[in-house]
Amino acid sequence: MRLIRNLKLKHQISLLILIALIMMILMQSMYNIFFNSLTRERAAKYAGNLMEQVALNVNTIANNVERDSVTISYSKYVQELMVSKNILRKIELNDYVSEMFTHTRSSNQNIYSILLLSNNDMQISDALHYNNDILKTLEKIYNFKSEDFRKPVFSSIVRDRSDAFYYYSYISPIFSSFDNSKIGNCIFLLDTRELEKLVNTTELTKNSLFLILDSDNRVIASNKGLKAGEYYDNIFWQEGTSSTAKDEIVYEGKKSLVQYKKIESTDWKIISVLPIAELTSDMKPIVTMGIWLGVIMSILLTIIGSAFMYNTTRPLMLIVRFLSRVGDRDLNYRLKMPSTNEVGIIATHINQMLDNVEEMTRNIVENQTSLYEAELSKKQAELSALQHQINPHFLYNTLNCLSSIGLAYDVSEVVSISSAMSRIFRYSIKGQDLVSIKDEMSSIKDYLLIMDIRYKGKFEIVIEMEESFLEMKSLKMILQPIVENAMYHGLEMKTGVGRLSIKGFISEDGYMQIDVEDDGVGMTENQLSELRKGIRDDENMEQLGTDKKSIGLSNINKRIKLRFGAQYGLDVVSEAGKGTKVTLILPIIEPTGKVHLLT
C-alpha cells in the first residue's frame, strides 16, 4: 500500500486502468471456463446416462439368461433326461426339452443356442445353432466338466471358426433335485450382434469412443470400427479400485474425458471417451463473441482512461512544476491555471498563500536536516517438515483384516506379512520421537521378515548389538530407510545370496555408532560423490529430483543434525562390486532420555 501511495498520480491512474483491464479479462476467462465446464459436465452426465442405460440392458439380458437357465436346469424333464438310462424314455423326454429350447429362444432374442451336457458327455442342444468348436474353446478355458466347477459364470467372448461372429456364453452347473449332486451343465450361447446394435445407436460426438470390453479386455462392441475380439490395450482405469471412474486423458492426440463403468453381473466394462474440444465446439461462437466484446471494451476503457488521465494529471503537473519553481526560491512567480474546477480553486489559494508567505520568508533561515532510516533485517530459518507421515490407522485396521483372512484361509505368508506390517505401522504412529534401539530394531526385524518372505532366502542378515546398547534411545524411524536402501539398491541386483550386517556399539570417542553394511553391487566413485553431495548440501535438495535414495538419507542426516548438532549425522562409503556401508553417529541417549552431547 505504501508503494502505491508513493507512485505518481498518472502511474496510479494507469495502474487502476490496468487492474480494470485485468479484472475484465479474468471475468471473461471465468465466464468461458464456467460455460466450458458446464458443457463438459452435461456431456459427461449424458454419456454417463448412456453407459447406465447400456449397463442396465446388459444386466437385463444377464438376469433373463440366468432366469431361463434356472428354469431349464431344474425342469423335471431335464433332470430326468440327464440321469435316465432308458433310451425310449430319453427320446420322449428329448422332445419336451427341445420344445423348451424353442420356447426359451423365441422369448429371448439374445440367445443363439442352448446346450445341455451331462456327466457322461451326452449332449442335448438346438441342432440348428449349436457349434462344437465353441464348446471345446469354453471347456479349455473354464473346465466346466470338473466337479470343482459349481458356480455359474458369464464367459469372455469366443469365435466360431465357421463364421466371423463372436459369441459369449452363460455356463451354469446343473445339480440334482434329489441329492444335490452335479449331473451336468447348461450352456447358453449368446450373440454379440445385439450388443453391437445397442452400442451403435448411442449418440455421442463425432470422434467419441464408446465400447464394451469383456473380462479379458477384449472388444465386444464398439462405435468406432474396433473389431470384436481385439485386445484393447488403452487402459484408462485402475482395476479393482471402483466400479465407476471419470478422468481426463490424452487420447489419439486429443485431450478427452474418459468414463469407465464396470458391469458386476458379467464382469464387463463400458468405456466412453469424449474429446473435450468437441464437447465445447457449440460454445465457440459465444466464446468468440465474448472475446470481441472484451477487446472492444478494453479499447474503450483504454481511450476513456487515457482522456481522464490527461485532463486530471495535466493541471496537477502544472501545480507540481510551479511548486518546484517556488521551491527553488522563485517566490515572485505566480501560478496561472486555466481550469475553473477544484484544481483552479487550489491554484488561487496557493497564489494567495504565496503573497502572505513572501513577507515572512525574508527573515527565515531555512535549515535542512537529513533523516536516516536504519533497517535491521533478520534472517528467519524455517525448518521444513522432514517426516511426512500418512496417518496409517486405516492401514493398520486393514492389515488386521488381512491377517484374519490369511488365518481363515491358512495362508501363513499373508498372516506373517500383514502382522509384521501392522506392528510397523503401530510403531510409526507412536507419539514420542525418541524410542529405544530395541524398539527400532524390532521394527527393522519385521521389515526384514517381509523381505525374507518376498525373496525366499536371498539375503543373510547379521545383527550385532549388546543388550545394554539396545536399551539406549535414538530418533524413531532412522534405520528403516537405510536398510531399505541396502536391500533395493545394493542386494536386490546382486547375483546369488547377499549379506546385510547391522552393528551397534559405543565408540571410544563417546558416541553411539550404528553401521549398516551390505555386500551388494555398491557404487562408483561418481555415484558416491553425487550421493554425498545430495546428503550434505541442503541447497541441492530440489535438484535431486526423484532420487529417493539420496532424499531419504538426506532426511535422516538433517533430522539428526537439527536435533543434536552438526557433529552428528551419517556418512556413506561404497565401492562398486563390493558393497556399501552407511554409518550413523548419534549422541549417547540413556533409557531415561538424558542426552550426552559431545563438547
Image (cartoon, grey):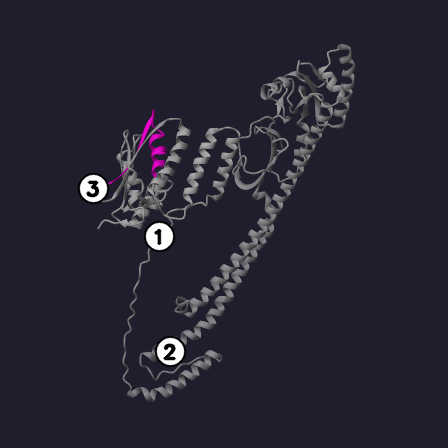
Q: Does residue 224 appear in the picture of this structure?
A: no
Between 381 and 9, the one lying in front of the other is: 381
In the picture shown, does residue 81 fall above or below 372? above
Kindly identify which residue carries mark 3. 508
Q: Position of residue 372 (x, y in %)?
A: 28, 71
Amino acid type, label 3: Glu
Badge 1, how many Cα within 10 Å: few under 14, some, many 20+?
Answer: few
The answer to whether residue 290 shows anywhere in this view is yes
Q: How far apart are marks 1 and 2 (CA)?
A: 56 Å
Which percent across, then down, holds residue 250?
52, 39
With respect to residue 156, does 236 lie above or below?
Answer: below
Q: Foreground: 30 or 291?
A: 30
Q: Quadrant of residue 244?
A: top right
Q: Which residue is drawn at 62% across and 18% down?
A: 145
The picture quadrant where one finds residue 67 is: top right
Amino acid type, mark 2: Phe
* Residue bearing the label numbered 2: 322
Q: Is residue 448 left or right of residue 367?
A: right
Q: What is the C-alpha distance between the residues marked 3 and 2?
A: 83 Å
Looking at numbered disc 1 in the image, what kind of residue is underneath it? Answer: Leu
Magenta region: which residues?
Answer: 481-509
Q: Residue at x 60, y 27 (%)?
A: 227
Q: Label 1, secondary structure: give it.
A: loop
Of pointers 3 and 2, the one earlier in the residue sequence: 2
| Residue assigned mark 1 | 383
In the displayed structure image, the side of residue 146 where residue 6 appears, left or right: left
**210 w.r.t. 472: above or below:** above
Q: In which quarter of the image is the N terminus?
A: bottom left
Q: Which of pointers 1 and 2 lies earlier in the amino acid sequence? A: 2
Magenta stretch: includes residue 491: yes
The kind of secondary structure element at disc 2 is helix
